[in-house]
Image: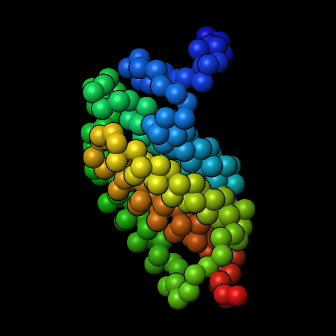
Amino acid sequence: MKIYTRTGDQGETGLFGGARVNKSHPRVEAYGDIDELNSTLGVARALCKEPHATLDDLLARVQAECFVIGALLATPADKLNLVGGLDTGLLEQAPKRMEAEIDAWEKDLDPLKTFILPGGTQSGAALHLARAVCRRAERRVVDLALSDPLPEGLIVYLNRLSDWLFTAARWANWKSGQTETPWSGL
């Protein structure tokens, strides 16, 4: 299979199910941001090896979930049955699972008393970047939901994932002995 098809040369792309839309369509913007999020998660994984092997495994799981979300967003509501049940279960259970992981990480961390600047170790900084991209993707999905019906749970998933990534960044920095930089204002 060739990587190029030439079918998008006029500024359109195909959605799952066959419909063609402009590449600036809100649905394409939303799944494009999820794709960017998934790519930033890949960078974070590349940087989250030892002493973060467990975190790498968790990030791999989240990447797989982002693929599901991308497929859901690339599928118009009237065609969702084409995604083979991917819209059931994943989004319902994942936020609770992420909350449990956040709670476990927070047991190791000092409670926040002020805002912190994103950064720290390479892995911590990459996770902070992924969090910011996740927030943008969430905003795009919220915007899309104003005009197109979406599977239940997408927005909740992305909201919890950004919290999860923030805490993962803090935990990765802590695990590496990197102190956080508090925001001191202007």
The residue at the point 70 percent across, 88 percent down is 186
Q: Position of residue 11 (x, y in %)?
A: 60, 24
Q: Is residue 81 above or below residue 68?
A: above
Q: Position of residue 62 (x, y in %)?
A: 48, 48
Nearer to the camera, 8 or 97: 8
The residue at the point 53 percent across, 79 percent down is 109
- The answer to whether any part of residue 183 appears in the image is yes
- Total numbered badges shown on the rendered structure: 0
Nearer to the camera, 149 or 109: 149
Residue 36 location, quadrant: top right
Residue 103 location, quadrant: bottom left
**In the image, 129: left or right of 92?**
right
Q: Is residue 54 above or below residue 71?
A: below
**In the image, 143: left or right of 186?**
left
Residue 158 location, quadrant: bottom left
Nearer to the camera, 122 or 2: 2
Quarter of the rendering occupied by the N terminus? top right
- The answer to whether any part of residue 177 appears in the image is no
**In the image, 121: left or right of 142?**
right
Q: Is residue 16 above or below residue 34?
A: above
Q: Position of residue 147 (x, y in %)?
A: 34, 42
The residue at the point 69 percent across, 76 percent down is 178
How does the figure colour the protein chain or chains?
rainbow
